[in-house]
Image: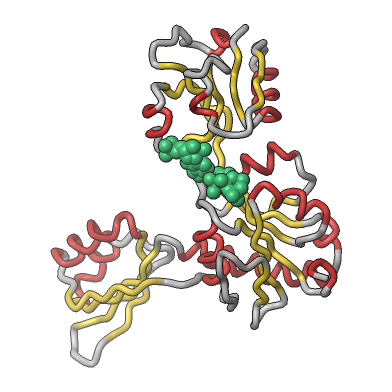
């Protein structure tokens, strides 16, 4: 019933590290839907796309098989499953690394030192191809979870697992040794849906919105007043997207300046602007930028 109601579907992780950002992205794209972690299916009231919330491990196959037309999934899971899907765009969240970690006192210093060792992992496919690329012969011990425990249980000598801050590895007496894969969440599409004219039109509409919200991400809209003769100086301070908009004010000799600044240099820019003569500085968030 679910798969055949004719509406397009996007699969997202139901309850995990990608859930909040996936929901936020779809909402930033203007999609209106109710989302509860226990609900599998949330129809969108204002866009021809419904949200299917499932375990992240199932997303590659669901998109490959057309149960969902689109999906948001970590590159690590996508690659491990070797699913045949179309990768639309990296999304800039869910960042992590698949890394080989070794016990603190291990003698492993270079990749060739892994020869002959047992590597515990839940990512045998990616690891196998990494070892092959580096011409290393190790034994891959395929685990289903609690990978960090493997060395202390003597199930493996070293491990290959997802690391973000490195705290977990440290907690288990391991030191991260080398990166096998850098990963982030990506938007993927079913191959047949990409070829279907009607579905493709909806995917293209969504893509424009995704790109718009990505463009806007980390940017602020800046408005300020300044003496006209300070414009040249102010322009040098604003690392704007394009040249700032300068509008004369009723008060002679004064102008309003509008521009876009990046969040990370925002305070720095503000201080310089004030010094350069700007006043009444107003900063607002940007929801989207369509080019
Ligand atoms: O229930 P379901 O199967 O849907 O969820 P899950 O438990 O399989 O996945 P989840 O929610 O843990 O992760 C989903 C995706 O988030 C992963 O596939 C990655 O793409 C991404 N991601 C980002 C991470 C991490 N950061 C992360 N830190 N996935 C897992 N971890 C784990 C890691 O496995 C290790 O146990 O966090 C621990 C390490 O974290 P640090 O910060 O201590 O290094
Ligand atoms: Zn999972």
Specify the color scheme. secondary structure
Task: Please state if 242 lies on the left or on the right of 183 as rendered.
Answer: left
Q: Residue furthest bottom?
A: 250
Q: Position of residue 158 (x, y in %)?
A: 53, 18
Q: Identify the residue at horizontal 83%, vertical 74% (top origin).
A: 6
Q: Quadrant of residue 229?
A: bottom left
Residue 123 location in percent, x, y? 64, 31
Left or right, 286 with reference to 52: left
Q: Which residue sits at x=69%, y=72%?
A: 50
Residue 132 image position (x, y, % from top left) = 70, 18
Q: How many marks?
A: 0
Residue 291 visible somewhere in the drawing: no
Identity of the residue drawn at 72% across and 60% down: 70
Quarter of the rendering occupied by the C terminus: bottom right
* Vertical order, 221 against 247 (above or below): above
Residue 95: x %, y % from top left: 50, 45
Confirm whether residue 251 shows in the render.
Answer: yes
Q: Quadrant of the N terminus?
A: bottom right
Residue lying farthest to the front in this orientation: 153
């Amino acid at each position: 019933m679910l798969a055949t109601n004719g509406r397009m579907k996007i699969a997202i992780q139901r309850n995990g590290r990608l859930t909040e950002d996936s929901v936020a992205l779809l909402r930033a794209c203007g999609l209106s839907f109710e989302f509860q972690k226990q609900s599998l299916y949330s129809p969108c009231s204002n866009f021809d796309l419904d949200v299917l919330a499932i375990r992240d491990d199932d997303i590659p196959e669901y998109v490959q098989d057309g149960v969902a037309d689109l999906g948001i999934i970590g590159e690590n899971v996508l690659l491990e499953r070797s699913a045949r899907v179309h990768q639309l765009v990296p999304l800039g969240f869910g960042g992590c690394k698949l890394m080989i970690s070794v016990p603190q006192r291990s003698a492993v210093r270079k990749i060739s030192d892994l020869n002959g060792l047992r590597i515990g992992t839940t990512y045998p496919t990616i690891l196998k191809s990494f070892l092959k690329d580096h011409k290393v012969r190790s034994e891959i011990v395929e685990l289903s979870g609690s990978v960090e425990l493997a060395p202390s249980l003597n199930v493996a000598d070293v491990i290959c697992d997802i690391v973000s801050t490195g705290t977990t590895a440290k907690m288990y007496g391991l030191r991260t040794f080398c990166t096998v894969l850098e990963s982030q969440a990506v938007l993927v599409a079913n191959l047949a849906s990409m070829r279907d004219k009607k579905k493709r039109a909806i995917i293209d509409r969504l893509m424009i919105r995704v790109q718009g919200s990505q463009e806007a991400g980390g940017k602020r809209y800046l408005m300020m007043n300044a003496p006209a003769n300070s414009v040249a100086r102010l322009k040098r301070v604003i690392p704007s997207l394009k040249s700032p908009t300068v509008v004369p004010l009723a008060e002679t000799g004064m102008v309003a300046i509008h521009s876009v600044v990046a969040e990370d240099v925002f305070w720095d820019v503000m201080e310089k602007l004030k010094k350069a003569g700007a006043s009444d500085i107003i900063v607002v968030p940007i929801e989207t930028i369509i080019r």
